[in-house]
Amino acid sequence: MMKRRQFLGLAAALPVITTFGGWSLFNHAVSAPRFDNTLFLPGADGPFAVLEPNEPLTLVAEQGWLSVPGRGETPFLWYRTKMNGHEYQNPILLLRTGDELDVTLDNQLDEGTIIHWHGLHVPGREDGHPIQTVNPGSQYEYRFRVTNRGGTYWYHTHAHHRTARQAHQGLASFLLVSDDDNEALNDALGLELGNTDLPLVLQDKRFDRLGHLVYQPNPMQRMMGYLGDEVLVNMTPSATHEVQRRLHRLRLLNGSTARIYRLALRADGEAVPFQVIGTDAGLLESPREAHEAFLSPGERLELLVDFAAFAGGDRVELHSLEFEPMAGGGMMGGGMGGGMGRMMGGGMHDGDPLALLEFVVREGEAVTAEVPERLSRIEPIDVTNAAERDIRLDMARMQWRINGEVYDPDRVPIEVDANTQEVWVIRNADRSMPHPMHIHGFSFQVLSRSGGPDFVREQAVNEEGLTVADLGWKDTVLLWPGETVRIAIDFTHNYEGDQLYVFHCHNLEHEDNDMMVNVRVRA
């Protein structure tokens, strides 16, 4: 077995960033970030409990009070439900491919809301389109079969012009789908959901002096994106978590409204490699080793981290490395990057270095396991006869646009035929900012990435410029200023009649400011 010193010696060849928000990775005389709150983990009851729905559920959207470590009780929006005589808030729904989901949304808020099943392949009526927003006191019924492959999905509000605030205040949770491949992997590695298989949602938040969540974007933040002044993992600020000396599966979800994370692991200031095993819509064909990866709002990334290489008492930290969000497009941090780009937040800016989570390795014997070389099978989308569609992202009159359009519920700028394939060539303007673009109802495959900043091109894993976050099946893809990304979408389905979805930026302030268009799939 590789010793910890040998492991870190090999990892030292990987590039590292030298400063993190005022403290140095190599100068330990400077105080390190404090990780003093125990990470909240999903349990069998209460908030974020893991539920396997075996009966129809009613999710009541309402305001409650959530206890946040170091902050006390804060007003919080959640989905409350009852099952088998127990009550849960924002439950993590655990389903298997082929299961039926029977959910009624009961809106007990004082404003409209609706649920979007992010990443699931469902008919348009079941998708949570913003035009389906229901009024206070009203209900909406969802009945559909889960046809997705196993993976880490989620559900969240998609209320028209209210998505960002409602999501920031709490209306979101995981929806995990299992299948034969996922079960085979967890069995082979001895992984257990909630113990060594960990759902982790990253969210930046703002709190007032009373410890209450605050969502009050100014006009610039509504245009650029609203950033919190601290990052929480599973609603835990400055989180720490004890891990066994063995492999762990980390299911990372960027649940922030606007912040992008450049994820990396560090131990004693040295880079710790990890294996990427899955992206938005499930497992990759094979593990891919990496030392950093970007995760934009709405995206998911699944990692395997081997803590068996460390001794008891060692600490491994999850960080977001520094980057310039407006780099690319020939600007290299100038223009917007030096001006508007740094006006998004208050004390913390997008691209600032952040310490997110500390893992403390327990004493005990190391448990080793062989990671399978083949995780799943991914058939490439056949684009031989695919139509090609140009998608342009830009700004005019202080509004971000898609092909010159802002959202109009009565217009359908994109129409495609069911059971056909298309290649979308998405081009982000030079004078722009990063846009995580999300399509409802379908997954896609990223074909190529070009024109982005140097720090993105350096992460490329193939000649097409893809990063590890682009591999496998996706529903959200990040575009940097001046970048062009080509994606393949298969619009095959067996739903009756025309289906209406949306394509939008998952910077939720951009979405609420109408960077969104309707997409009709014609029968």
Image (cartoon, grey):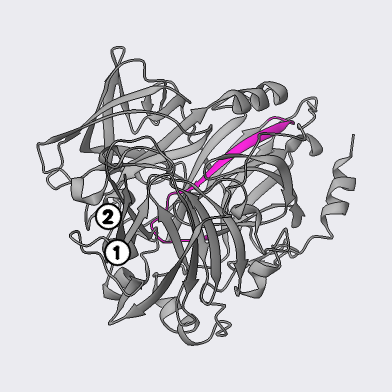
Q: Position of residue 137 (x, y in %)?
A: 9, 37
189 sits to left or right of 166: right
Q: Is residue 336 above or below residue 179?
A: below
Say what secondary structure mark 2 lies in. Answer: helix
Q: Position of residue 109 (x, y in %)?
A: 15, 42
| Residue 36 appears anywhere in the view | no
How far apart are the two marked residues, 2 and 1, measured between alpha carbons?
27 Å
The disc at residue 388 is none
Residue range in magenta is 244-260
Inspect the magenta stretch and tell me whether residue 259 lies in it: yes
Farthest bottom residue in view: 335
Q: Amino acid at mark 2?
A: Arg
Q: Is residue 279 left or right of residue 214?
A: right
Occupied quadrant, residue 65? top left
Badges 2 and 1: C-beta atoms under 8 Å apart? no
Is the residue 491 above or below the residue 403 in the image? above
Which circle marks residue 165 in the picture? 2
* Picture quadrant where residue 164 is located: bottom left
Residue 423 image position (x, y, % from top left):
51, 59
- Residue 413 badge: 1
Q: Residue at x 36, y 64 (%)?
A: 226
Q: What amino acid is labelled 1 in the image?
A: Pro
| Nearest to the observer: residue 169 or residue 145 | 145
Label 2 neighbourhood size at 10 Å, few (<14), some (14-19), many (20+)? Answer: many
- The residue closer to the viewer here, 226 or 335, is 335
Q: From the viewer's perspective, is residue 339 above or below residue 447?
A: below
Which residue is found at the position 49% from the left and 30% from the top?
Answer: 177
- Within the magenta stretch, is there residue 374? no
Q: Give the x, y percent position of residue 298.
A: 44, 51
- Secondary element type, mark 1: loop
Q: Earlier in the sequence, mark 2 or mark 1?
A: 2
Is residue 141 visible in the rendered image? The answer is yes
